Image (cartoon, grey):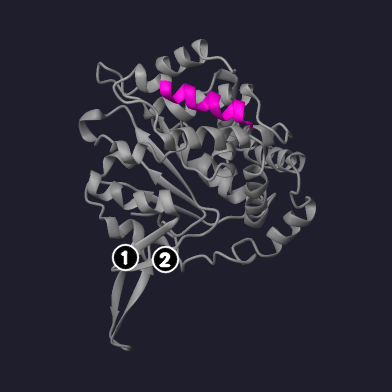
Amino acid sequence: MTDPGESGPFGAGPAEPVDGEAESTGGEVGGAAAAAGVDPETPADVAALADRIVGEVEDVIVGKRDAVEHVLVTVLARGHLLVEDVPGVGKTTLAKSVARSIDGSFKRVQFTPDLLPSDVTGVNVFNRRTDEFDFQPGPVFANVVLGDEINRAPPKTQSALLEAMEENQVTTDGTTRALPDPFCVIATQNDVEPGQTYELPVAEVDRFTKKIRLGYPDTDEEAAILGRLTGDHPVDAVEPVATVADVRRARRIVGEIEASEAVREYVARLAVFTRRNARLGASPRGSLALVRASQARAALEGRGYVIPDDVQAEAPTVLSHRIRTESGGTDGADVVQDALDRIRVE
């Protein structure tokens, strides 16, 4: 189910248009925000855009600049993010703040054991006046979709996201519908009640570009959070500092950032190392995600080319969750770190 107060069936309004500039939902506010910046045309412009977004979100998410950057890298790399952590550390607030800062549509789905796939993707409803079926879009039709505690739903429901995350489309009753552009799933995973959750299918985990943890704030950060939350929730004050059109242009620039043959071979050798040293290593999809994330990291630095440092910065969050060790464990961080220590750029 979705948040109370969201419009439309299942908490979703009509499908967002893919083409043109009509995806912005902020009206005059979004227009003013767009006028405040410059349409991104170079990696330096993407870096400036990212700084504006990070600065706005940091007004809400205290002391988590790295986490906000991980979200931006994921969005710019055309991917999806899995956040595994304990309840109450700001996962939902992070997703909602990023959506507001880019003037994008936001929907939240609370995954529960009785949630159906159609509750996520949408369903055809019979219209008695027209004697036809009308499609009622589900909450997946949004720029940023928060899947809250995704591992509380059974695999059948989780599988409803597979096509959406891989192909940016949804097929229901033989009809395929495009999702908004940009489209990003930010899913949270409960890791403190394993007896009341389901393990995510490997095929679904592999579709997440990155997996991160937020962690608890330190004393000063928590005191600052308490001070900000005594009145209205600060997420309500987040203003758009970009538009979804800006994000689309930034993504195009990121896709044009040079990843040399040496860098691509480096990524491939890292992936091969994980396959040789684990029961299940990183897939070619994981290698592609690492290249794209490295391009986005280079853009955040204002560079038009990828360097090994970008790959090394992104590899732990891009590859680790895809690895299954010989002991059956799902934490491949040690394997990835071993690969980074042993493999050199040639």
Mark 1 vs mark 2, CA separation in Å:
8 Å
Q: Residue at x 55, y 18 (%)?
A: 219
* Marker disc for residue 172: 1
Mark 2: secondary structure: strand
From this viewpoint, is residue 33 visible? yes
Q: Residue at x 68, y 51 (%)?
A: 242
From this viewpoint, is residue 215 visible? no
Position in image of residue 4 (x %, y %): 40, 57
Tell me which label, 1 or 2, sits earlier in the chain. Answer: 1
Which span is picked out in magenta? 260-272
Q: Amino acid at mark 1?
A: Thr
Position in image of residue 320 (x %, y %): 42, 25
**Crowd tier of the residue under label 1, counting other residues whose Cα lies within 10 Å: few below 14, some 14–19, many 20 or above:** few
Residue 121 is one of the magenta-drawn residues: no
Whether the residues at callouts 1 and 2 have beta carbons within 8 Å, the answer is yes
Position in image of residue 269 (x %, y %): 48, 22
Mark 1: secondary structure: strand
| Dominant secondary structure of the residues highlighted in magenta in the image | helix
Which is nearer the eye, 76 or 154? 76
In the drawing, does residue 7 fall left or right of residue 173?
right
